[in-house]
Image (spheres, helix red, strand yellow):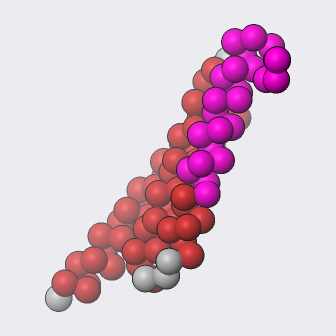
Amino acid sequence: MSAIVIFTAVAIAQSMLAVAMAIASIRMFRGPRAQDRIIGLDALYINAMLMLVTFGIGTGRVVYFEAALVIGMLGFVATVALAKFLMRGEVIE
Protein backbone atom coordinates (compact mmCIF):
# COMPACT_ATOMS: atom_id res chain seq x y z
CA MET A 1 0.00 0.00 0.00
CA SER A 2 2.69 2.52 0.95
CA ALA A 3 4.76 1.75 -2.17
CA ILE A 4 1.79 2.59 -4.37
CA VAL A 5 1.28 5.87 -2.53
CA ILE A 6 4.97 6.79 -2.88
CA PHE A 7 5.10 5.97 -6.59
CA THR A 8 1.88 7.90 -7.21
CA ALA A 9 3.18 10.92 -5.29
CA VAL A 10 6.48 10.79 -7.21
CA ALA A 11 4.63 10.61 -10.54
CA ILE A 12 2.42 13.57 -9.63
CA ALA A 13 5.46 15.56 -8.46
CA GLN A 14 7.32 14.79 -11.70
CA SER A 15 4.40 15.92 -13.83
CA MET A 16 4.07 19.16 -11.87
CA LEU A 17 7.81 19.76 -12.14
CA ALA A 18 7.60 19.20 -15.90
CA VAL A 19 4.91 21.88 -16.14
CA ALA A 20 7.01 24.22 -13.99
CA MET A 21 10.03 23.60 -16.24
CA ALA A 22 7.95 24.46 -19.30
CA ILE A 23 6.77 27.71 -17.72
CA ALA A 24 10.33 28.60 -16.66
CA SER A 25 11.55 27.89 -20.21
CA ILE A 26 8.93 30.24 -21.61
CA ARG A 27 10.06 32.96 -19.18
CA MET A 28 13.68 32.30 -20.07
CA PHE A 29 13.12 32.61 -23.84
CA ARG A 30 10.47 35.34 -23.90
CA GLY A 31 11.50 37.45 -20.92
CA PRO A 32 11.24 41.14 -21.71
CA ARG A 33 14.45 41.97 -19.82
CA ALA A 34 17.70 40.19 -19.09
CA GLN A 35 16.83 39.96 -15.39
CA ASP A 36 13.66 38.03 -16.25
CA ARG A 37 15.66 35.63 -18.37
CA ILE A 38 18.12 35.00 -15.54
CA ILE A 39 15.27 34.35 -13.11
CA GLY A 40 13.77 31.93 -15.65
CA LEU A 41 17.11 30.14 -15.93
CA ASP A 42 17.38 30.01 -12.14
CA ALA A 43 13.90 28.50 -11.83
CA LEU A 44 14.70 26.03 -14.62
CA TYR A 45 17.81 24.64 -12.96
CA ILE A 46 16.06 24.38 -9.60
CA ASN A 47 13.21 22.45 -11.20
CA ALA A 48 15.69 20.21 -13.02
CA MET A 49 17.47 19.54 -9.75
CA LEU A 50 14.18 18.62 -8.07
CA MET A 51 13.26 16.41 -11.02
CA LEU A 52 16.48 14.46 -10.51
CA VAL A 53 15.70 14.13 -6.81
CA THR A 54 12.27 12.68 -7.62
CA PHE A 55 13.89 10.27 -10.10
CA GLY A 56 16.26 9.23 -7.31
CA ILE A 57 13.37 8.67 -4.91
CA GLY A 58 11.48 6.66 -7.52
CA THR A 59 14.38 4.43 -8.54
CA GLY A 60 16.34 4.33 -5.29
CA ARG A 61 19.64 5.09 -7.03
CA VAL A 62 22.18 7.41 -5.44
CA VAL A 63 23.57 8.75 -8.73
CA TYR A 64 20.53 10.99 -9.23
CA PHE A 65 21.09 12.68 -5.88
CA GLU A 66 24.73 13.31 -6.72
CA ALA A 67 23.81 14.79 -10.10
CA ALA A 68 21.24 17.03 -8.39
CA LEU A 69 23.93 18.26 -6.01
CA VAL A 70 26.26 19.11 -8.91
CA ILE A 71 23.47 20.93 -10.76
CA GLY A 72 22.65 22.89 -7.63
CA MET A 73 26.24 24.04 -7.12
CA LEU A 74 26.87 24.93 -10.76
CA GLY A 75 23.51 26.69 -11.06
CA PHE A 76 24.24 28.86 -8.04
CA VAL A 77 27.64 29.87 -9.40
CA ALA A 78 26.14 30.62 -12.83
CA THR A 79 23.40 32.77 -11.32
CA VAL A 80 25.90 34.77 -9.27
CA ALA A 81 28.16 35.25 -12.31
CA LEU A 82 25.27 36.40 -14.50
CA ALA A 83 24.03 38.80 -11.82
CA LYS A 84 27.52 40.25 -11.45
CA PHE A 85 27.77 40.62 -15.21
CA LEU A 86 24.48 42.52 -15.33
CA MET A 87 25.49 44.79 -12.48
CA ARG A 88 29.02 45.71 -13.62
CA GLY A 89 29.38 44.52 -17.20
CA GLU A 90 32.25 42.19 -16.32
CA VAL A 91 32.62 39.00 -14.32
CA ILE A 92 36.33 38.99 -13.53
CA GLU A 93 37.82 42.23 -12.25
Q: Position of residue 26 (x, y in %)?
A: 62, 38
**What secondary structure is the stretch in magenta mostly built from?**
helix
**Quarter assignment of residue 9:** bottom left
Q: Position of residue 75 (x, y in %)?
A: 62, 44
In the displayed structure image, the side of residue 92 where residue 47 appears, left or right:
left
Of residues 13 and 46, the one drawn nearer to the viewer in this rendering? 46
Please determine whether, in this image, residue 91 is positioned above or below residue 50. above
Of residues 37 and 45, the one drawn nearer to the viewer in this rendering? 45
Q: Position of residue 16 (x, y in %)?
A: 41, 56
Please determine whether, in this image, residue 71 is positioned above or below residue 39. below
Does residue 37 appear anywhere in the picture?
Answer: no
Outermost residue toward the left in this view: 1
Please determine whether, in this image, residue 68 is positioned above or below residue 8. above
**Going 69% across and 12% down the picture, which residue do you hit?**
87
Q: Is residue 73 magenta?
A: yes
Q: Which residues are magenta?
A: 70-93
**Quarter assignment of residue 69:** bottom right
In the displayed structure image, the side of residue 68 where residue 8 appears, left or right:
left
Outermost residue toward the front in this view: 93
**Going 75% across and 20% down the picture, which residue do you hit?**
85
The number of discs equals: 0
Quarter of the rendering occupied by the C terminus: top right
Quarter of the rendering occupied by the N terminus: bottom left
Q: Is residue 50 magenta?
A: no
Of residues 66 and 20, the one drawn nearer to the viewer in this rendering? 66
Q: Position of residue 67 (x, y in %)?
A: 59, 65
In the displayed structure image, the side of residue 5 where residue 37 appears, left or right:
right
Of residues 38 and 67, the one drawn nearer to the viewer in this rendering? 67
**Going 64% across and 29% down the picture, which residue do you hit?**
80
